[in-house]
Every structure is written in C-alpha cells, then in structure tokens.
Image (cartoon, rainbow, N blue to C red):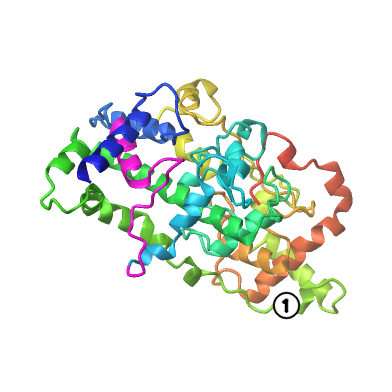
Amino acid sequence: MRATIIASVLSLACLIAGCAPSGPPKFRLNDVELLKRERESLAVGEHFANSYREQVGNLLIALFGTPDDPRFPFPLGEEDPAHEILSVENLKLAAGPVSSDRRDKHSGLYREHCAHCHGISGDGAGPTAGMLNPYPRDFRLGKFKFKDSPLRRPPTDDALAITLRRGIPGTGMPSFQSLSDEHIDALVDYVKYLSIRGEFERYLMAEIPRMGGEPLIDLEELARAGTDENESLDDQLFTVVGDWLSEQVVARWLKPEKSVTPVPPMNPGVAPGHPEHTALVAQGRTLFHTKANCVQCHGDTGLGDGQTENYDDWTNEWLKTPGVLGDDSSTWTEFLAAGALPPRKIRPRNLNLPVYRGGGSPEEMFVRIRNGIEGTPMPSTPETLLNNDETWAVVAFVRSLPYANGSAAVKQPDPSAGSGSPSN
C-alpha cells in the first residue's frame, strides 16, 4: 500500500516539475508570488534556492491532489471539524473534465462554468481573463469582495452561493441561477478548496526565506522514515504539516457564519415616499461629506472621481515588490512573464449609476458600508464611527444619487468601461 502511495505522489509531482510534455490539466504554481518572495529575499541578502519551486509543487500535489483528482488533506470525518468546511463528494462533482452519464448526472462543473475566466488553478487568469474588466477573481488570496462577514474573515457558503446565483452586475461574472442547488453547492466547495490550497501555497512560499536552503519537506525521506509500517504516507505527511495547514489557513474557514455582520431593522426613512425620507437623505449627504469621508474616493457628487490612484490587493500583492513601479511597465516584465495580469488602477464606484455589484438592497448596502469591501481601498466603517441610524442615513443618500444626479451620471462614463476597475 505504501509503495503505491509513494509512486502515486512522485508521479503526480513529476507533472508539476515538467517531466511530462502533455497530459491532464494541472494546477499552475503561483510563480508571481514565488518571484515576489525571491526578490524580497535577495533585497535583504537571504538565501533563496531554485529548488523550492519543485518542493512547493510536490507538497501541494501530495496534500491537495490535481484538477482531475482533488484531495483535501484532512480526514473530514464527523470527529474532525474540517468536515464542516467542504465535502469531498462536492469536490469530485466540480472537478475533472466536463462529462455526464446516462442518467444526465453532470461532473466537471468548475471547468464547464468557471475555468475559462478564473483559470484551472483559480488564479483569475483563465483564457478570457485579459479581455474582462475588472479581471476575474483570483481565489488564491482567500479574499472575497462581496460577503456577509467582516474584513479578514472568509465568506459564508450563503454569500458565495448568492454571488453564483446572481452574478455580479457590471462585470463579466454572469448569473448561474439556472444551476441546481446541488451544483451550486459543489461549486461553492470547490472555490473554497482552491482558496485554501492557494492560501497554503502562499504560506509555504513565505516560509522559504526562513529555511536557509533546507528543504521544506522531503517526501521520499518522509516515506522511508515512517515509524509505523501501518501508517500511510498521508498520515505521516499530515503529522509533519498538519499544524502548519490547520493553524495558518484552515482554522479561519471554520464556522464563518459565527462572524456574520448583524443587520439591524432598516430605518423606514430609507424608503422613498416615507415622511422621513428627505430628512434622512439630507443627513446622509452630510455624513457622506464629513464623518464617513466617502467623498475622498467617491467625489463630491458620487461620480467616483475622488482618489483614483489606488490598486486592489490582488495587484498590490506583487506591485509593491522592491524594484517594481506602478507607472513604469519596464519593471513589470518578469512578473507578467510569471503570470501576472497588467496592473489596472481601481476606480471608486460611480454611485450615480444604479448598478451595485454586491447587491442593491438597503440591507446589502448597509453591510458593505459597515464591513468595507475586502481587497479594495473601501474601508470598514465600524459602529464606533457611524452608528446604525447614521449608516442607514448614508444608505438612503447613496440610493438617492442616481435620481438626484441623473444628468451628471449621463455625462460621466462608468469607470468600469475604461482602464479602471470599480471597487463596489
């Protein structure tokens, strides 16, 4: 049994190391992150061995499998809390080539519906990505813009499912409302799998400069050094890296619903036609320009013409590497060759256009103002800064802008149509 596992791991590892010129799809290593770590290490005179690329690839395959045969490096039994994160059955349904059996049971859902934009690896660099503005989401940071949980907390399954069913208006992300609940659930789990895999990949690459040239882990030596002949390579591997993985990545994905932002009852004045609506909008306008400081980015009239020189986190991840300058494309060439998409400045949303990417209900807008938008310059606005009534006032004002400034909205083009990528 052990020999079979070892042979399987090493043959799969050979794929990522480039032994086979062709074959089934494989996860692409995050070479952009690796290049960033290498540049950072060299800048402070630390050692960075070229062999680490292969080591990271081998370890990821051993733990997470391949696009055709995904794995999750936990038992996922009832006694293990990790089983609450995702279902291996859902991974199998979403992974692999697109197919259906005689009973019309479909599989390969991710490749059928998502990979052409988000890429096989979930890196947001699929075949059509460069033509879309904003770029498709790179899941590997574990960050999601539109969710019901605060910054630095993963989204709930419900939040991911809503995005899949509704799509994201004003972007290339379509609605998948026609998919069954079973297929939506499978895609939600697969997105979480890609995110956890990508986060752990980045964690491993962050560890490289601290290794002093020593291997991250030697799979062959690990197999030879097993103390119990009945212990599988999987068990031994998990013994070595399980704490890394569970503490650094997986633990934060447990029970995200516990941190969902509560939404208080809506102030009835948010509704147009309510006797208090005009006064609430006026209060929101004042807060927009003063205490909430929305005007800094969204501009005096909400056209999105305030601060327009920022980038989102997915770009800043590599654009802030030593020696890379946002306004000098000659400093990007290595990163573009490694798989980065050309950087685009992120434009604040033109609030005069009634297109709300994270949902346009008052409750959804309340959550976005309270939580901010993960991965973008849009900050959180805690209750200590704006209380609930004040937040509802800002919601009322923002919702009034497409009607109050309709003529201005026509004159100002939607920032998503140009080189900018609106944040919300």
User: Magenta residues, as a range?
Assistant: 54-79
| Label 1 sits on residue | 267
In this orientation, which residue lies closer to the viewer: 279 or 26? 26
Residue 241 placement (x, y as % from top left): 25, 50
Q: How many marks?
A: 1
Identify the amino acid type marked 1. Asn
Pick whichever, 347 or 154, lies toward us: 154
- Mark 1 burial class by Cα count in 10 Å: few <14, some 14-19, many 20+: some
323 shown above or below 188: above
Question: Is residue 31 in sight in this rendering?
Answer: yes
**How far across and how far down the image is residue 268, in percent?**
77, 78
Which percent across, then down, holds residue 295? 68, 54
Residue at 71 percent of width and 47 percent of height: 304
Residue 34 point in image, percent of width and height: 37, 33
Residue 322 highlighted magenta (yes or no): no
Q: Is residue 75 above or below residue 203?
A: below
At 51% from the left and 44% from the top, the residue drawn is 313
Say which of 340 and 164 sits in front. 164
